[in-house]
Image: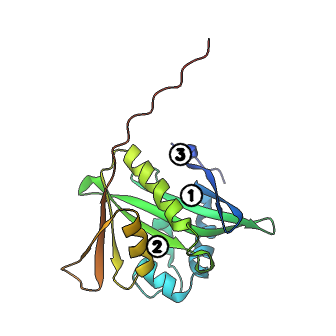
């Protein structure tokens, strides 16, 4: 099988440290579907509920297709991974999808593996996602979160998001942030 990846944002590949271990943060690839399926399957029932706002024993194929359908412009997904016994192990993911009705806004979602929470992985993913969204011209980032999802709400508050109750559904809160305008990158000078 051959993959054609247009505009793969290789500049988003990074190495971060958490709990004394090196982690790779990178944009997802088309061949990461099984890695993502394993990740979501490894989450506790509560963590899957908080991420998808629905009780899922398994992530259905149609949803996996949507999660894998990134184009790096209107839909970007970053994953955090470590390597255990020579094998990739996904431990976190963050993504945004541009709002079709408002091309200056996007919706975000984040999930971190149960054993890796509280180590700054969610924050590292969110910071990189925000920077890329701003550099892509997006001006607002938001998410609906369950009001009981204190980890997500706490992360958002620390990152400067406003939190307000959703009038349509009292179970939800709306997280929103205005993104800083990123100046265009200047080309590096050419050495003579």
Of residues 14 and 70, which is closer to you in this image?
A: 14
Q: Callout 3 environment at 10 Å: few (<14), some (14 to 19), or many (20+)? A: some
* Residue designated by label 3: 9
Residue at figure coordinates x 34%, y 48% from the top left? 180
Q: Position of residue 136 (x, y in %)?
A: 39, 45
Q: Are marks 2 and 3 in contact (CB under 8 Å)?
A: no
- What is the image's colouring? rainbow
Q: Callout 2 environment at 10 Å: few (<14), some (14 to 19), or many (20+)? A: few
Reply above or below: 37 against 68: below
Q: Are marks 3 and 1 in contact (CB under 8 Å)?
A: no
Q: Is residue 32 left or right of residue 186?
A: right
Q: Callout 1 environment at 10 Å: few (<14), some (14 to 19), or many (20+)? A: many
Q: CA distance from mark 2 to mark 1?
A: 18 Å
Mark 1 lies on a secondary structure that is: loop
Q: Earlier in the sequence, mark 2 or mark 1?
A: 1
* Residue designated by label 1: 28
Residue 174 — which label? Answer: none
Residue at figure coordinates x 23%, y 57% from the top left? 101
Q: CA distance from mark 3 to mark 1?
A: 10 Å
Q: Is residue 134 left or right of residue 85?
A: left
Mark 3 lies on a secondary structure that is: loop
């Amino acid at each position: 099988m051959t993959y054609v990846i247009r505009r793969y944002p290789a500049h988003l590949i990074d190495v971060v440290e958490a709990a004394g271990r090196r982690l790779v943060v990178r944009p997802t690839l088309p061949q990461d579907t099984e890695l993502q399926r394993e990740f979501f399957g490894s989450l506790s029932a509560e963590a899957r509920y908080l991420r998808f706002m629905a009780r899922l024993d398994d992530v259905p194929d149609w949803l996996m297709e949507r999660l894998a359908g990134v184009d790096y412009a209107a839909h970007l997904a970053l994953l955090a991974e470590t390597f255990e016994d020579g094998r990739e192990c996904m431990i976190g993911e963050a993504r945004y999808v541009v709002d079709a009705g408002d091309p200056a806004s996007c919706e975000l979602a984040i999930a971190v593996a149960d054993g890796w929470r509280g180590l700054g992985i969610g924050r590292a993913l969110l910071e990189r996602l925000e920077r890329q969204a701003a550099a892509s011209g997006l001006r607002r980032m938001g998410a609906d979160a369950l009001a009981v999802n204190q980890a997500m709400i706490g992360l958002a508050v620390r990152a400067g998001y406003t939190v307000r109750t959703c009038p349509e559904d009292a179970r939800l809160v709306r997280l929103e942030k205005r993104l800083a305008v990123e100046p265009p990158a200047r080309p590096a000078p050419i050495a003579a």
